[in-house]
């Protein structure tokens, strides 16, 4: 897949990364860099952050970014977290 690539952008993603965001990233083509390819890596957020600091990843799409001056964070999305359950569930009827 990466044969003939001029540049490879190494991107880490955690399990909680929005799949739509990942597919959008993979669909972007930059006319000035036609030979650039994206290689995805999956791991836990703290491990991905460590790889970015070490320079083995170019960037990471993660949640729960550790507070460190060696990382620059950019908020990409702010989505609420929902829990859904059946109306028949006993837990949902307690108030």
Image: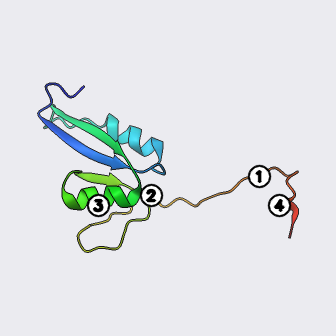
Q: Which mark is residue 50?
A: 3
Camera-near label (3 vs 4) is 3
Q: Which mark is residue 53?
A: none
State the separation of the CA atoms marked 3 and 1. 36 Å
Residue for badge 4: 91
Q: Earlier in the sequence, mark 1 or mark 4?
A: 1
Q: Earlier in the sequence, mark 3 or mark 1?
A: 3
Give the side of residue 89 with respect to residue 80, left or right. Answer: right
Quadrant the N terminus occupies: top left
Camera-near label (4 vs 2) is 4
State the separation of the CA atoms marked 4 and 2. 30 Å
Residue for badge 2: 77
Tell whether label 1 touches label 3 (CB within 8 Å): no
Q: Which residue corresponds to the image point at 11% horizontal and 33% vertical from the top-left?
A: 6
Q: Which residue corresponds to the image point at 18% horizontal and 39% vertical from the top-left?
A: 8
Camera-near label (1 vs 4) is 4
Tell whether label 2 touches label 3 (CB within 8 Å): no
Tell whether label 4 touches label 1 (CB within 8 Å): yes
Helix, strand or loop at label 3? It is helix
**Relative image position of residue 78 (x, y in whole percent):** 48, 61
State the separation of the CA atoms marked 1 and 4. 9 Å
Residue for badge 1: 85
Camera-near label (3 vs 2) is 3
State the separation of the CA atoms marked 3 and 2. 22 Å
Helix, strand or loop at label 2? It is loop
Quadrant the C terminus occupies: bottom right
**Relative image position of residue 44 (x, y in whole percent):** 41, 54
**Relative image position of residue 41 (x, y in whole percent):** 33, 43
Q: Earlier in the sequence, mark 2 or mark 1?
A: 2
């Amino acid at each position: 897949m990466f044969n003939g690539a001029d540049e490879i952008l190494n991107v880490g993603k955690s399990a909680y990364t929005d799949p739509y965001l990942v597919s959008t990233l993979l669909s972007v083509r930059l006319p000035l860099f036609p030979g650039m390819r994206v290689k995805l890596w999956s791991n836990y957020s703290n491990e991905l952050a460590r790889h970015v600091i070490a320079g083995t990843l170019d960037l990471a799409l993660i949640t729960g970014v550790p507070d460190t001056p060696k990382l620059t964070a950019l908020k990409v999305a702010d989505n609420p977290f929902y829990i859904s359950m059946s109306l028949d569930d006993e837990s949902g009827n307690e108030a």
